[in-house]
Image: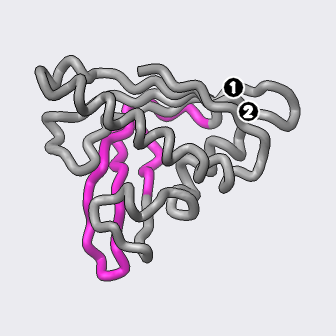
Amino acid sequence: MEHAFATWTQRTSTWWPASHTVSAADDLEISFEPRVGGRIYERTSGGQEHDWGEVTAWEPPRRLGYLWHLRADRADATDVEITFVPVDASRTRVEIEHRGWERLGAAGEERRDRNRGGWSGLLPHFIGAANEPITIEEHS
């Protein structure tokens, strides 16, 4: 469980695909500031920063929450909550709840559907980086 949480929050750059970033650069660092109110952002090798979100819950190694606005205005942020649940001594279940789409009005449903595809493409990278048996549950 601790390893899964750390992989998500401290080793993000090792598994997050460049195609799912603002700059699409291969040589960037993705950072979570480890506190409520902390920034989530990418920094390119040239020092350019792009905000992705803001931490709303920081409870290592069990729970992480954040406002998510990658490639969008902060006013259009959605809420992501990730819970890390021990299954046994060597396995962790990762539960993802992504909500707040209704705040986006008519565009919310389309963005939610598009984002589901994003999670589906992203999570295998996380599982590979975690290098431990992990199961994923997504709730939208």
- Count the numbered circles shown: 2
In the rendered image, residue 68 lying in the magenta stretch gets the answer: no
* Percent of width and height locating residue 82: 52, 30
89 above or below 35? above
- Other residues around mark 2 within 10 Å, as few (<14) / some (14–19) / many (≥20): many
Q: Amino acid at mark 1?
A: Val
The residue under label 2 is: 92
* Percent of width and height locating residue 55: 38, 38
Which of 96/42 is in front?
A: 96
User: Quarter of the image holding residue 36?
Assistant: top left
In the image, taking residue 135 as reference, residue 17 lies left or right, namely: left
In the rendered image, residue 37 lying in the magenta stretch gets the answer: yes
24 above or below 121? below
Label 1 vs 2, first from the N-terminus = 1
Which of 44/117 is in front?
A: 117
User: Quarter of the image holding residue 83?
Assistant: top right
Which residues fall within the magenta stretch?
31-60
- Whether tag 1 and tag 2 are in contact, CB under 8 A, the answer is yes
* Percent of width and height locating residue 137: 59, 25
Colour mapping used in the image: one colour
The residue under label 1 is: 85
In the image, taking residue 140 as reference, residue 94 lies left or right, namely: right
Q: Which mark is residue 67?
A: none
Q: Residue at the spot x=28%, y=48% of the render? A: 70
Q: Residue at the spot x=51%, y=62% of the render? A: 13
Q: Residue at the spot x=37%, y=31% of the render? A: 56
